[in-house]
Image (cartoon, rainbow, N blue to C red):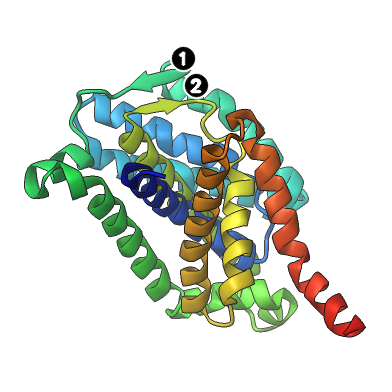
Amino acid sequence: MSISVVIGAIELGLIYAVMGLGVYLSFRVLNLPDLTIDGSFTCGCAAAAVCTVAGHPYLGFVGAFLCGSLCGLTTGFLMTKLRIQPILAGILTMTALYSVNLRIQGGRPNISMFGMRTIFTDMQSLIGEDAASLVTILAVLVLLGLVLYLFLHTQLGLSLRATGSNEAMVRASSINADRMKLIGLALANGIIACSGALLAQYQSFADVSSSTGKMVLGLASIIVGEAFFGHRTILRGMLSVVAGSLIYRFLLTFALQFGMSASDLNLFSALLVALAISLPYIKKRRRAHA
């Protein structure tokens, strides 16, 4: 496997680690199975592409975050105000977002940004072409990760964490649990949309079907990372997501290098997640029979 393939795997792993942080917030912190991901990720891609084509690549990230947050708020509204089950609420929003994302892209299924100014081209002019992509992605990941970590240690963040741990206790403490869910889902999907914006500018195109399988990918990052590093603290959980995303991406890269068809990657991902989820049970059974 060449150096360029390894660096490409690291860069994609870090991009999806940004998405993993958003999935971690909804899946682990809020304890909600949010399926909005497959729609909000593409929404971020579309918003970033439209802004980049208009000559505002940095504004694309702001637009992506706002659009992703609106996606999360929509799911949260369906859950908290209309009392729709979380999984069904996420599916409804995700389904509706396919049409919304097409609208954002002006009815076009894809938008090309080749030859246009992006955050990556700006970084290339500062530090050179070789390290620009990796440094840019790492900077975005560290910035969003730091903001999320600090937020989860504020009073509002602690209330949000408490809602995920014990909603009944939170309601008994006069904290508005529904509001915490709305805030958490908005923030989670905003971060996920930023990952989509980063990927769109990295690949220089946005496609309306680019989010297929992203839910499995996000869960794989969390579960694979936690299988190796655990999640007893917020910092450890977030670092596990980053490590899990890199491990997962390298596993996919190795599979492709050894001849696996790209059409089989979703099957491979699902099997990997199933194995990672069942790993604690397998270890327990082995200890019991030892």
Q: Residues within 10 Å of mark 2 (few under 14, many from 20)?
A: some
Q: Which residue is mark 1?
A: 107
Q: Residues within 10 Å of mark 1 (few under 14, many from 20)?
A: few
Q: Is residue 176 visible?
A: no
Image quadrant where residue 267 sits: top right
**Disc 2 to disc 1, how far (Cα)?**
5 Å
Q: Amino acid at mark 1?
A: Gly
Extreme residue toward the left, this view: 126
Q: Is the Cβ of the residue at disc 2 closer than 8 Å to that at disc 1?
A: yes
Residue 288, image x, y percentages? 89, 83
Q: Is residue 218 above or below residue 237?
A: above
Residue 108, image x, y percentages? 44, 15
Of the pair 287 and 240, the residue shown nearer to us: 287
Q: Amino acid at mark 2?
A: Leu
Q: Is residue 183 left or right of residue 263?
A: left
Residue 216, image x, y percentages? 64, 47
| Residue depicted at x 39% and y 40% | 199
Extreme residue toward the right, this view: 289
Q: Which residue is mark 2?
A: 102
Image quadrant where residue 28 sits: bottom right
Of the pair 253 and 44, the residue shown nearer to us: 253
Sequence-earlier tag: 2 or 1: 2
Image quadrant where one finds the N terminus: top left
| Residue depicted at x 61% and y 78% | 162
Q: Secondary structure at mark 2?
A: helix
Q: Secondary structure at mark 1?
A: loop
Extreme residue toward the top, this view: 107
Q: Is residue 222 visible?
A: yes
| Residue depicted at x 58% and y 34% | 259
Q: Is residue 6 above or below residue 171?
A: above
